[in-house]
Amino acid sequence: MGGIRTDEKNPGYKHIFIEPQIPESVTWAKTTKESPYGTIAVNWSLESGKLNMDIALPVGCTATVILPQNTRDYKLNGKNGRRNSNTVSIENGNSKITATL
């Protein structure tokens, strides 16, 4: 349900893709994945039409987050994201994404 997968062009979890899989009637999920750089953590929840994601990436790791197709807009760490985009690039550290579905 966390949807963490490595980027084949950047093996060893240097760059990953995060694509939450949200089955009907599931309102939250937490997942971790060990990488050579440390622990990758993805926690998401659905509340009132919003997808809230807390992501932790270790130093040396970057990610592309793929949001659901029905995303209308999103914020990354409180700042408005690009319009008409369902991908978000994040660096190592802690990131919070809030997407309006």
Image (tube, rainbow, N blue to C red):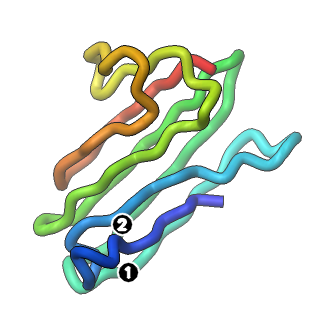
The percent coordinates of residue 47 (x first, y second) are 68, 24
Q: Residues within 10 Å of mark 2 (few under 14, many from 20)?
A: many
The percent coordinates of residue 27 (x first, y second) are 75, 39
- Give the residue drawn at x 80%, y 49%: 23
Q: Vertically, is 91 above or below 27?
A: below
Q: Give the position of the C terminus as an image quadrant.
A: top right
Left or right placement of residue 74 versus residue 35 in this view: right
Q: Residues within 10 Å of mark 1 (few under 14, many from 20)?
A: few
- Give the residue drawn at x 40%, y 27%: 85
Q: Which residue is mark 2?
A: 40
The percent coordinates of residue 79 (x first, y second) are 26, 16
Left or right placement of residue 93 versus residue 29 in this view: left
Q: Which residue is mark 1?
A: 34
Q: Give the position of the N terminus as an image quadrant.
A: bottom right
Q: Vertically, is 31 above or below 49?
A: below
Q: Amino acid at mark 1?
A: Glu
Tag 2–tag 1 contact (CB < 8 Å):
yes
- Give the residue drawn at x 86%, y 42%: 24
